[in-house]
């Protein structure tokens, strides 16, 4: 597995009096850490506001790591779906939820902060993601609400229990026990996780996204939030004419970066 990390200019110039906060960005199906690093244009925003950004991998990799027996692109290597697998043979390697939210931040904290805490990977942190990674960001955020300052997503899979991508992944990694599926589905989590601090989630989706109706169904999250503590705290924005690509993502990264910077205490 790879991980890409961008350290802002403030890290080298030592211009911030407190530890530099971090945004974890979760990529989508088939991606590596390079996709968002090369095409998301987060780096300029990191330098502008003074945050570190971490791009984790999308699945375990290497010899002996199981993948889709049909060798398709939407399951297995490159498609870990940010859950802890409980179904064999994937349960040994595919623990992406544990990796992203706990193992990786602790490893980075140990590696970078040997003497003094210069980068905050553990406390003053936010999370964002795209597509499968948008699902991972929403799910991980709601399951760890006290851990993250803010959450945003581009084209997220908001209701994986009821769309083909999610059903394939959940059945493959978790088995047919739907109660396990509910533990990760954002449309189920909004009903059980109490938003006591009135936190807001920012979401952008392109109106010309080819996956909009069949796989993403973003309005399902608004419907699920009605009557809950999340109602009126999910800011879903439709971008006219945009698709699922990084042209879309890079266009709205500045808005997401500003959103996170405010919650991280940078502006």
Image (cartoon, rainbow, N blue to C red):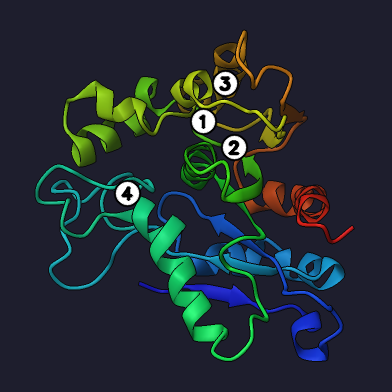
Element class at badge 2: loop
**Alpha-carbon distance for marks 2 and 3?**
12 Å
- Sequence-wise first label, 4 or 1: 4
Q: Residues within 10 Å of mark 3 (few under 14, many from 20)?
A: many
Which of the 4 image quadrants contains residue 49?
bottom right
Give me the residue at 75% from left, 51% from top. Answer: 260
User: What is the x, y in percent for residue 206?
Assistant: 68, 33
User: Which is closer to the viewer, label 4 or label 2?
Assistant: 2
**Alpha-carbon distance for marks 3 and 4?**
26 Å
Task: Residue under label 2, please give it.
Answer: 155
Element class at badge 4: loop
Name above or below for residue 224 compared with residue 75: above
Give the residue at the far top of this rendering.
Answer: 227
User: What is the x, y in percent for residue 22?
Assistant: 65, 65
| Left or right, 260 with reference to 228 | right
Residue 239 image label: none
User: Which is closer to the viewer, label 3 or label 4?
Assistant: 3
- Sequence-wise first label, 1 or 3: 1
- Sequence-wise first label, 2 or 1: 2
The answer to whether the residues at label 2 and label 1 have Cβ atoms under 8 Å apart is yes
User: Which is closer to the viewer, label 1 or label 3?
Assistant: 3
Task: Residue under label 3, please give it.
Answer: 221
User: What is the x, y in percent for residue 37?
Assistant: 61, 68
Q: Quadrant of the C terminus?
A: bottom right
Task: Residue under label 4, please give it.
Answer: 73
Between 69 and 17, the one lying in front of the other is 17
Task: Residue under label 1, please give it.
Answer: 211
**Alpha-carbon distance for marks 4 and 1?**
15 Å
The answer to whether the residues at label 1 and label 3 have Cβ atoms under 8 Å apart is no
- Sequence-wise first label, 3 or 4: 4
- Sequence-wise first label, 4 or 2: 4
């Amino acid at each position: 597995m790879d991980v890409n990390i961008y350290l802002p200019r403030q890290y080298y110039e030592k211009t911030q009096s407190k530890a530099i906060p971090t945004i974890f960005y979760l990529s989508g199906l088939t991606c590596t850490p390079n996709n968002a690093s090369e095409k998301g244009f987060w780096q300029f925003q990191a330098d502008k506001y003074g945050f570190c950004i971490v791009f984790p991998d999308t699945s375990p990799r290497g010899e002996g790591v199981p993948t889709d027996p049909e060798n398709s692109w939407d399951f297995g290597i490159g498609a870990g779906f940010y859950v802890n697998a409980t179904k064999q043979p994937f349960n040994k390697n595919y623990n992406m939820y544990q990796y992203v939210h706990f193992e990786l931040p602790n490893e980075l904290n140990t590696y970078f902060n040997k003497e003094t805490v210069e980068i905050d990977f553990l406390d003053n942190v936010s999370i964002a993601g795209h597509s499968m990674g948008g699902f991972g960001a929403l799910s991980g955020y709601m399951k760890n609400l006290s851990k993250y300052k803010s959450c945003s997503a581009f084209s997220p899979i908001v209701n994986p229990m009821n769309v083909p991508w999610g059903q394939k992944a959940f059945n493959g990694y978790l088995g047919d026990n739907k109660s396990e599926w509910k533990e990760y589905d954002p449309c189920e989590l909004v009903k059980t996780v109490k938003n006591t601090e009135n936190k807001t989630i920012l979401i952008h989706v392109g109106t010309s996204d080819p996956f909009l109706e069949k796989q993403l169904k973003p309005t399902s999250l608004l419907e699920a939030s009605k009557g809950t503590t999340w109602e009126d705290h999910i800011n879903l924005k439709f971008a006219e004419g945009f698709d699922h690509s990084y042209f879309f993502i890079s266009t709205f990264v500045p808005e997401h970066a500003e959103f996170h910077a405010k919650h991280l205490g940078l502006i």
